[in-house]
Image (cartoon, helix red, strand yellow):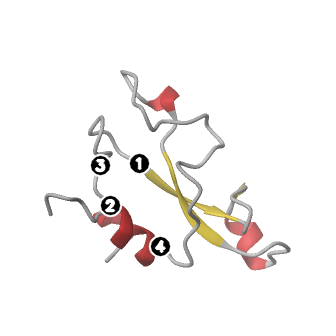
């Protein structure tokens, strides 16, 4: 599964994004992954400023959704896309 196959938010229907993080959930850019000093991972970002309406799981610009950090983009996509009606 590719990150481009990520389903939209189940609450508002808008796009969510994958961000690279350290093991503490702090968002980093690609340069950090070249020389990480605090682990690596992937998480969902769903900033409320990108949305036309309120969403119950949206966050600030630099805050991930939830507390789970995944080891790969594929793992994150598989779990995010798993829905009760799937």
Q: Which mark is residue 73?
A: 4
Tell me which numbered mark, 3 or 1, is placed earlier along the sequence.
Answer: 3
* Crowdedness near tag 4: few (<14), some (14–19) or many (≥20) residues, C-alpha within 10 Å: some
Q: CA distance from mark 4 to mark 1?
A: 13 Å
Q: CA distance from mark 2 to mark 1?
A: 8 Å
Q: Which mark is residue 16?
A: 1
- Figure check: 62 above or below 42: above
Helix or strand or loop: what does disc 3 sit on? loop
Tell me which numbered mark, 2 or 4, is placed earlier along the sequence.
Answer: 2
Q: CA distance from mark 2 to mark 3?
A: 7 Å
Circle 3/circle 1 CB separation < 8 Å? yes
- Figure check: 84 above or below 33: above
Circle 4/circle 1 CB separation < 8 Å? no
Q: Residue at x 14, y 58 (%)?
A: 85
Q: Residue 48: where, in percent of width, then height?
A: 49, 30
The residue most toward the left is: 85
Quadrant of the rendered structure where residue 36 is? Answer: bottom right
* Crowdedness near tag 1: few (<14), some (14–19) or many (≥20) residues, C-alpha within 10 Å: some
Tell me which numbered mark, 3 or 4, is placed earlier along the sequence.
Answer: 3
Q: Which mark is residue 8?
A: 3
Q: CA distance from mark 3 to mark 4?
A: 15 Å
Circle 2/circle 1 CB separation < 8 Å? yes
Q: Which mark is residue 6?
A: 2
Q: Which quadrant: the N terminus?
A: bottom left
């Amino acid at each position: 599964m590719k990150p481009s196959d990520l389903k939209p938010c189940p609450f508002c229907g808008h796009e969510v994004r994958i961000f690279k993080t350290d093991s503490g959930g702090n968002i980093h850019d690609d340069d950090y992954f070249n020389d990480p000093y605090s682990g690596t991972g992937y998480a969902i970002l769903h900033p409320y400023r990108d949305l036309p309406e309120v969403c119950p799981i949206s966050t600030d610009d630099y805050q991930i959704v939830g507390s789970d950090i995944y080891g790969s983009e594929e793992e994150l996509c598989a779990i995010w896309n798993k829905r009760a009606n799937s």
